[in-house]
Image (cartoon, rainbow, N blue to C red):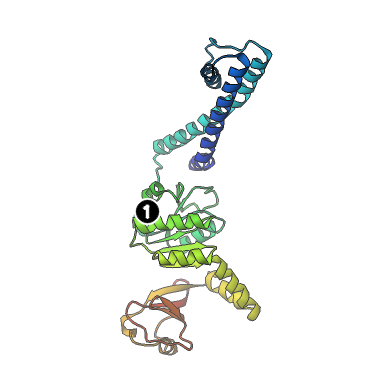
Amino acid sequence: MLTIISIILNKVKRAQIVALAVLGAIATLICGALFALAEHVSVWIGLYWAVTTATTVGYGDVTPHNAAGRIIAVVTMLTTIPLFGGAFAMLAAVFAAARLTTLLGVEWKIPTGGHVAIYGMGPVVPLLAGELLEAGKQVVVVADGDSSALPLKVHHFQGDPTEESVVRKSQPEKAERSLVLGERDSDVLLTTVLLRHLAPLVPVVAVTDSAKVAEALSDLGVSRTISAEHLIGHTLAKSLETPHAADLLVRLIATNGYRLDEIDLPPELVGEPISVIRHEERVEGLILGAVHDGEVVLGVGRDPALASGDHLLVVRLTGH
């Protein structure tokens, strides 16, 4: 039953309802004007006739009396009635689906603990959500799209993430971290602005195809901005220079045997450089680098003394 409700909600698009209603109204106006011209009546009488025809009321007080009027009547019935009928049918489906959701007690609820909120839908979201679930995270996806590919344990909130009412209803302030992605960079930018306004203390990671948009998002105070353009470009370039660089990256982030963790710098290691911590094996796992002053450093060439609030990037065996 939940799947049926989800399918109904996903298929009914407000844009489609508006488009059908607008087309129906335009057809009614045109047909009314043509009827008035053909039957030699006033425009208001023509519009009155067109409205009663389009709504299937048909009082019968105004009827066509010549061949041209009858042809216009046929055209009106074949265009306006299906257009308005489709719009009203879709609107009824929205209310029916919402009512079913309420009756069955399956209204969308915010997870009780901290969760990762994903705003937007795309081919990568189901895989991303699955990885987060395996890592023990609760996942909320706020998107206006087909959710059938999402893992069952994902909380899916149907709605347009570029609308303030939808983002506000998702209670972004309760999230541990938010991720924003979308088909268009403008959508990513708009959703990010809403999140920064509604939940300024929650870290936001944004994914964009444009390096310029990534720079604009960083100026908004987004904690992390990922440019897909730069990420793919740098990875391909390094793969050409070092044939197994891409394989190394994939193994680091897509292997179940071990995982990449970002941990707080232990207090006893404050003031120590990465090279010393790595050499003395004072942290369990393989230390790849550290986050120092908001920047990732590898400890090769540049090896600053780490400070309180820094983080270590460590590869560990799964389960440790």
Q: Is residue 21 left or right of residue 98?
A: right
Residue 20, given in percent of the width and then of the height, sits at: 55, 33
Residue 265 x/y as whole percent: 36, 79
Q: Is residue 172 left or right of residue 126?
A: left
For the residue labelled by badge 1, is the local secondary structure a helix, a strand or a loop? loop
Q: Residue at x 36, y 50 (%)?
A: 168
- Whether residue 242 appears in this view of the structure is no
Residue at which label 1 appears: 111
Q: Is residue 221 above or below residue 240?
A: above
Residue at the (55%, 51%) spot, across then down: 149
Q: Can you give x and y, in whole percent of width and height, for residue 197 in the image?
A: 35, 57
In the rendered image, the quadrant that contains the C terminus is bottom left
Residues packed near mark 1 inside 10 Å, few (<14), some (14 to 19) or many (20 plus): some
Q: What residue is drawn where x is 42% and y is 81%?
A: 284
Question: Of residues 17 and 202, which is closer to you in this image?
Answer: 17
Q: Position of residue 234 (x, y in %)?
A: 58, 74
Q: Please, is residue 206 above or below residue 4 in the view?
A: below
105 or 78: which is nearer to us? 78
- What amino acid type should be assigned to the residue bearing mark 1? Pro
